[in-house]
Every structure is written in C-alpha cells, then in structure tokens.
Image (cartoon, rainbow, N blue to C red):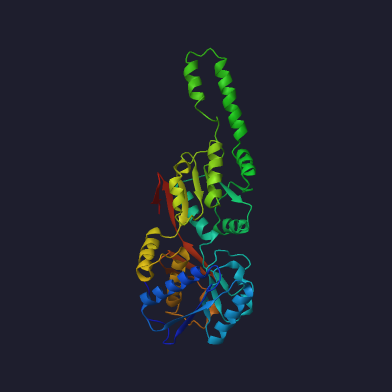
Amino acid sequence: MWPISVYSEEKIKIGLLVPMTGDNKKLGKLIIEAARIALKDIDTNLLEIYPKDSGTSPTETLKSAFEFKDMGVNIVIGPIFYKNLSFLGEVDDIIFLSLTNKTIDLPKNVISSGVNATSQLNTIKKFISLKEIKKTIFLTPKLDYEAEIKKGIKNSKIKVFKHYIYKTEPTQLTSQIEKITDYKKRKQNLFDEIKRVEESDLVDKEKQLEKLKKRYTIGNVNFDSVVISDFDESLKSVITSLLYTDVSPKKKFIITFNQWFDKSLLKEETIQPIYYPSINKKNLEDFKNKFFGEFNEYPNYLSLLSYDLVGLIYYLSLNNDLNDLGRLFQKKNSFKGKIGVFDIKDNKINHRLNLYQIKNGKIIEIF
C-alpha cells in the first residue's frame, strides 16, 4: 500500500498525542498499538514514533506539544478531542493531524483528519445524483454540531429543498415532524374521503371503505428523500416519527450520516431501508482481524484512522521535505489508505467514502 523509498535518509519523527491517563487511556492505547502495526507494515528504519499524553485539559495538551517541539518533532498525530486543541496555535513549526471530525475554529496549525460532514455530504450528493432524487429535505438536531452540518452543506454544494432544525425532546420532535410532513392535513384528507364514500351511492362502496380504513393518510409529502443528521436512539426516534406520520422508508429515501456499522440498526427492520456513507467496511473488518491477531483485542475506527495517518505521513515524505510543512498540506494531493482515499488541499483533509444500505437486517454496499 505504501511506497518503499523516501525523500531523504533522515529520520522521520512522528509525535502521537493521545490520552495515556484518565478515562480515555484505553482509547489512547488502541491508537498507539495501531501505529505500531503501521510501522511494522511499512517496514523502514526511517520512521520513529513518540507517544505523549494529551491529558484531560488543553493546558496539559499544550505542555506535551512543547515537549515535542524541544525533541525536533514537527508533525503530530492527535489530539483526539476537539476540546484539547484550544492552545495548540501557540506551538510554532508543528502540524497537528487531529483525529476530530470538527472543522470550525481550528488553530492554524491543526488539520482535522476525522470523517467530517463535508466528506459525508459529498458521498450523499453522489448517491442523490445516482438515484435522480429531485427534492431532499434535511433534518438536523439543535445540538453542538449543527454549525458543522451547515458548513458541510455549503462546502459540498449539495442541493437542499428545505433544512429543518429540530429539538430532540420526544414530544417536540413529534410535533415538528407532523408539521414538516403536513400530517394533520393528510390525515383529515383521509377522514373526508371516508365520509364522502360513506355518504355516496357507489356500487363498490363497501370495498372502497375497506381499502380506505387500511390507510393512515391521503396525499403525498413534497419531498423525495430525507437526510437525518442524527445518531443512535435519537436517529431511531426521528425515523419512528416519520413512520407515525405515514412517511415510509420503503417509499422515500431515508439517508443519514456515518453510523459506523451500528449493529443495533440491523434489528430495527421497521425503519429500513436506511442509507449512509462510511469508511470501507471490508478494510475495517480486515484491520480488526489483523489487530486482534497482534494484540488479542479489537480496535475502534480511530485506530484505523491513526494507522492510515502514519502511512499518509510516510507517503508525503516520498517527494517532499517534511521540514516544509507550511506547503505540504496546501497543495493538492491524494492518498489511498484503509479507510479510503484521503484528499488533501488547502490545509484540509476530506475522505472519499463508500455508501451503504441497511435492508432486511443486512448491510449492503451501494458504491
């Protein structure tokens, strides 16, 4: 997967800034182990990795960052969490490849390498074009990542028919979904039609009434697909509310954001089919097996991302001087990792993702 020669014979020092103490130390351990696998796979004596504790506060993170600077490290994988990035702009001459997927208000020397909203919406946009979907509405919860979704919509230039921001409290959510789907009017249409048929002299009146009483509403909604920017139980609640208002996933495309192959969704057959972008599933499974063979435990997706980032740095060192980091992530470049393709430009990393469907309790790759 990676090249076998580098720009110079100098050692490439990579810092690894991850939690090594506190509640998230297990996560940090998995990322360090993934980096070790990457070193083994690349098989060169030119790479050196130095782990340091990111701590639990931005101040602790900054202390470790200055220690990297004193060691002559100029590229660091980490930190993981957005909250740890606050003061890293004070550290000159180091680029931090943070594993966060947030992209707003980053220090100038921090590059978000997580699977961000723009990457996911680029993939959803491709799917919408493939299926020739004409009217797409967006449902986004009023949470802290609302601004990221709006930025992703702008960056991807995805066509949005309407964008609704909803409150996640169940009663308020149901009320909002009823308004969005014009449920009460469609329900009234059904009552009116039943009454009309009951008062008519139609020959097949009983047959028509029997059909009408099996329905929940009459009238269509004014969209073809719904993109739901939500996860876990909250996502299930939104889709259930759509079902309640007679908007079925079997008739309208229900698309959501990366669910990381959440197995609990496989059991919820009433809310299927669902579509979502994600990293390459086969590569993730292969990596999990490889990781388990090495360490007798399974990694998470951040481990796979850190594995790829070691490879990305090595790849960039092929024809570039790592001392010139100011330009390294500015120019257009692409790298194929286990997660998928990394696209680099203007100090940004986007991912080319796959798109999956959950249907009949199975995960199916669309592209």
* Left or right of residue 76: residue 44: left
Residue occupying the point 61% across, 76% down: 60
Image height of 141 relative to 192, above or below: below
Image height of 2 relative to 145, above or below: below
Residue 269 in view: yes
Instruction: State the quadrant of the C terminus.
Output: bottom left
Instruction: State the quadrant of the N terminus.
Output: bottom left
Number of numbered labels in the structure image: 0
Residue 135 in view: no
Residue at the front extreme, as displayed:
22
x, y (%) of residue 219? 55, 31
x, y (%) of residue 294? 36, 71
x, y (%) of residue 19? 54, 72
Question: Observer-nearest residue: 197 or 172?
Answer: 172
Q: Quadrant of residue 11?
A: bottom left
* Left or right of residue 306: residue 96: right
Question: Observer-nearest residue: 130 or 120?
Answer: 120
* Left or right of residue 212: residue 6: left
Image height of 336 relative to 133, above or below: below
x, y (%) of residue 157? 56, 56
Residue occupying the point 45% across, 59% down: 353
Residue occupying the point 55% across, 14% down: 200
